[in-house]
Image (cartoon, rainbow, N blue to C red):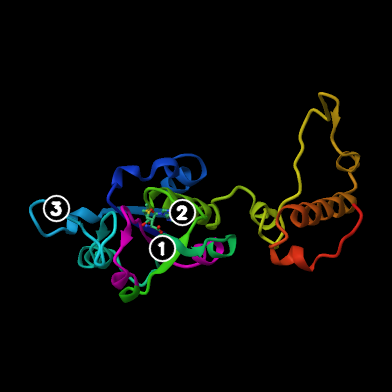
Amino acid sequence: MTWRASVLTLFPAMFPGPLGHSLAGRARETGAWSLDVTNIRDFAADRHRTVDDTPFGGGAGMVLRPDIVDAAVASVGDGRPVICLAPRGRRFTQADARRFASGPGVILLCGRYEGIDQRVIEARGMQEISIGDYVLSGGELAALVLLDSMVRLLPGVMGSSDSAGEESFSAGLLEYPHYTRPAEWQGRRVPDVLLSGHHAAVAAWRRAESEKVTRERRPDLRAAVALPERAV
Ligand SMILES: C[S@@+](CC[C@H](N)C(=O)[O-])C[C@H]1O[C@@H](n2cnc3c(N)ncnc32)[C@H](O)[C@@H]1O
């Protein structure tokens, strides 16, 4: 069965956006995944097509109404996980991308204004997910980020299945640095070991570089914490 992504948004024209190009775009054309986009405003009941209202308790901004969001979710709901993009959500990781990519697909709810009435998030058992500690104007860019990370992991989408296994975060480590021709550029030489043709030595060097950069830049990654200091 085709992996299916459904996006609920007030700005449907923002999709597929970048996902219409390159790897994801080609994979969609060949049927590796499908995308349907629903305009939340289509579920508004009044003639002004109102989807939001003022927050109870006062404060700035507007909140998306639970009844309208619920009807939009119901129109595509079929047991797939429903993700609500939210800065207050759990931070998205590569492990999440793998988990969602191995399922039937996802439903992504893009917030706007101050956000979405909490009752519909709870009633629909949504997973609140954030892409980082900053605030965007809407969930659309966050949805595109999540989808890109998932789609590239679908079977047959990436050229070499090895690529995903060695990438940053796959084994709890950041990736080693890459080099290509020319072997010397502006006085900077590629590390000799990479030109040696010695596969075991290359693998050991890459592992050591991964451990080093992870310790330096992301000591919070679990594997990095467990790594002993060692000379590279
Ligand atoms: C202006 S934001 C609302 C911010 C909200 N009042 C808060 O302080 O947490 C509007 C919408 O953008 C999306 N959004 C903003 N930042 C995000 C992030 N870091 N990750 C995921 N979604 C985000 C959410 O869907 C959110 O409902």
* Secondary element type, mark 3: loop
What residue would you read off at disc 2? 147
Q: What residue is shown at x 66% (from left), y 51% (from top)?
A: 163
Image coordinates for residue 162, horizontal then vertical, percent? 68, 54
Instruction: Identify which amino acid the numbered label 3 is placed on.
Output: Arg
Q: Callout 2 environment at 10 Å: few (<14), some (14 to 19), or many (20+)?
A: many
- Circle 3/circle 1 CB separation < 8 Å: no
Q: Nearer the viewer, mark 2 or mark 3?
A: 3
Q: Callout 3 environment at 10 Å: few (<14), some (14 to 19), or many (20+)?
A: few
Relative vertical location of residue 139 with respect to residue 182 in this rendering, above or below: below
Image coordinates for residue 54, horizontal then vertical, percent? 22, 59
Q: Earlier in the sequence, mark 2 or mark 3?
A: 3
Q: Is residue 25 visible?
A: yes
What residue would you read off at disc 1? 106
Instruction: Identify which amino acid the numbered label 2 is placed on.
Output: Leu
Q: Is residue 138 magenta?
A: no
Q: Is residue 31 visible?
A: no
The answer as to whether callout 1 falls within 8 Å of ligand 1 is: no
Relative vertical location of residue 93 with respect to residue 192 in this rendering, above or below: below
